[in-house]
Amino acid sequence: MKILVTGGAGFIGSQVAQAYLQAGHRVTILDDLSTGKQENLPPEAEFVRADIASPQAAELVARGGFGLINHHAAQISVPASVADPVDDAHSNVMGLLNLLEAGCRAKLERFIFVSSGGAVYGEMEGAPVDESFPARPMSPYAVAKLSGELYLDYYAAQHGLSSVVLRYANVYGPRQIPHAEAGVVAIFMDCLVDGHEPTIYSPEDLPGGMKRDYTFVGDVVRANLAALERGQGVYNIGTGVASDTLTIWEAVKKAAGREMAHHMGPARAGDIRYSALDCAKAARELGWRPDYDLARGMAETWAWRQRR
Ligand SMILES: NC(=O)c1ccc[n+]([C@@H]2O[C@H](COP(=O)([O-])OP(=O)(O)OC[C@H]3O[C@@H](n4cnc5c(N)ncnc54)[C@H](O)[C@@H]3O)[C@@H](O)[C@H]2O)c1
């Protein structure tokens, strides 16, 4: 199949593009290199440097003959979306619509949209949630992701576009950059390499810090392979295990075989306290389950960090 991967110079999209190439597909990557890197681009992929919201991107989709778009390109920082919601919506709403409109004119068959389970549900209640949990987006980033999901419902109903929404948990692994949506693993590894002791932010009743569902990028890539042909609608992609920040710091140090002190700091306003995803639907309908536990994922990530 001929596939367009947007955001394919980024942390996750580049590894999805690589996996699609390895599975025998033809891949074009559309990325403006705003956070992505040229060195992440698989050499066998065609590369077009453009903003997803631009006329050039619409032209590429209209004439490219793609069977499927896998949409990873996005403004990915929650604080940046709070500081400038218009800029966030430029990529995360207008960019998506630009691709969908051009895709429908070109009789595109299928669309994989990457959303965020960590963001769209908002605060959870201490147990993993499934896709029926009410969405309570708490940032412009989350509002834009949720609106993207609703647009896909509209395009399915109005234009018959089949689509899968993958709501990722906190993804970590090789190629992650520290400022990203869930960059704490990359931040901690940088601390060990640079010799800066990290600060762990925690409210009084959560001494190890906020709890999150940390999911290895290799597992996320396999979900994108499964979604090529299977599934319709929204799927959580995570592990269902909530780890606090202190546990992640311990796992990073263990993978690196190094010791370092850390500091504790007060919780930051707006940080979600608990987030974990129940992924039974993805297991049932996509045949997908995570393979990696924290120890194995951290070991692979550290091995990459040392080679960098
Ligand atoms: N990393 C996580 O934990 C996580 C969790 C949930 C969802 N996501 C989603 O996964 C996707 C990939 O995120 P990532 O962590 O790999 O981040 P990333 O920054 O590495 O990748 C995003 C890519 O999109 C490109 N891009 C951004 N705006 C663009 C635009 N307007 N036009 C063209 N290209 C543009 C960037 O250059 C970059 O290569 C995003 O949609 C993000 O919202 C990530």
Image (tube, rainbow, N blue to C red):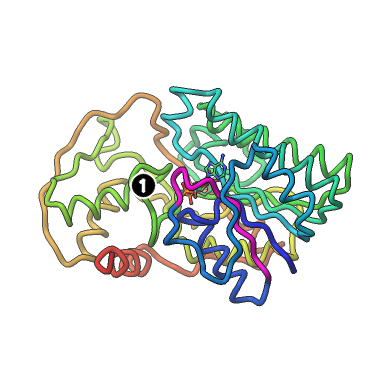
Name the residue at 63% across, 67% down: 225
Specify few, some or many for label 1: CA neighbours under 10 Å numbering under 14, 14-19, or 20 or more: some
Residue 126: x, y in percent? 45, 40
Query: Horizontal and vertical percent for residue 1?
Result: 75, 69
Residue 304, x across and y down, in percent: 32, 67
- Give me the residue at 25% from left, 30% from top: 204
The answer to which image quadrant residue 45 occupies is: bottom right
Q: Position of residue 291 (x, y in %)?
A: 49, 69
Q: Is residue 109 rendered to the left or right of residue 120?
A: right
Residues drawn in magenta: 26-36
The part of the image, by quadrant, that contains residue 40 is: bottom left
**Quarter of image, res 148:** top right
Between 38 and 186, the one nearer to me in the picture: 38
CB of residue at label 1: within 8 Å of ligand 1? yes
Q: Is residue 254 left or right of residue 282?
A: left
- Left-right relation of 173 to 33: left
Residue at image position (78%, 43%) is: 102
Magenta stretch contains residue 253: no
Residue with the mark numbered 1: 183
The answer to whether 142 is drawn above or below residue 20 in the figure is above
Quadrant of the image for the C terminus? Answer: bottom left
Q: Is residue 280 left or right of residue 193?
A: right
Amino acid identity at mark 1: Gly
Q: Secondary structure at mark 1?
A: loop
